[in-house]
Image: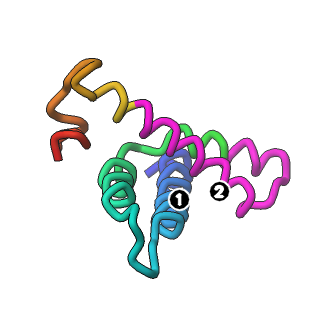
Amino acid sequence: MSSYEEQLAFYAKSVNDHLRERLSVRTPCLQMQVIDAMRYSLLDAGKRLRAALVMEFGRLCHAKRLDMAAFACAIEMIHAYSLIHDDLPCMDDDDLRRGKPSCHKA
């Protein structure tokens, strides 16, 4: 495996871990259905290339990794939102996203 692929895998795992932490709910809440939908569409999806670019830029600028992880998670959340929105019946009405039912179908 090339160092590029290894670094990309490292960033993807790091961002996935941060996303899981941000979407963890320790007590039941009224928004659990929304949080479950967010988890379904966001976690372990995609290569995290956008997040890796954010993390690498932060590394090059000597930013704190934890700070950059927050920005990388935000980028991934915005991207996931755009895909969910695109799949809705009023838009493309797609049944599948990355080989599994789209969020509104699930």
Magenta stretch, overall SS: helix
Indicate yes or no whether the magenta region holds residue 71.
yes
The residue sitting at 47% across, 64% down in the picture is 23
Q: Is residue 102 left or right of residue 6?
A: left
**Crowd around label 2: few <14 · some 14–19 · many ≥20 (10 Å):** many
Residue type at tag 1: Phe
- Earlier in the chain: of badge 2 and badge 1, it is 1
> Start and end of the magenta stretch?
55-82
Residue at (79% x, 60% y) in the render? 64
Percent position of residue 89, x then y: 22, 24
Q: Is residue 81 left or right of residue 87?
A: right
Quadrant in the picture for residue 66: bottom right
Q: Tell me the quarter of the picture where residue 105 sits.
A: top left
Q: Which mark is residue 10?
A: 1
> Which colour scheme appears in the figure?
rainbow
Instruction: Look at discs 2 and 1 and give the one toward the viewer.
Output: 2
* Vertical comparison of 46 with 6: above or below: above
Near-viewer residue (77 or 105): 105
Q: Residue furthest top?
A: 91
Residue 105 falls within the magenta-colored stretch = no
Q: Disc 2 designates what residue?
A: 69
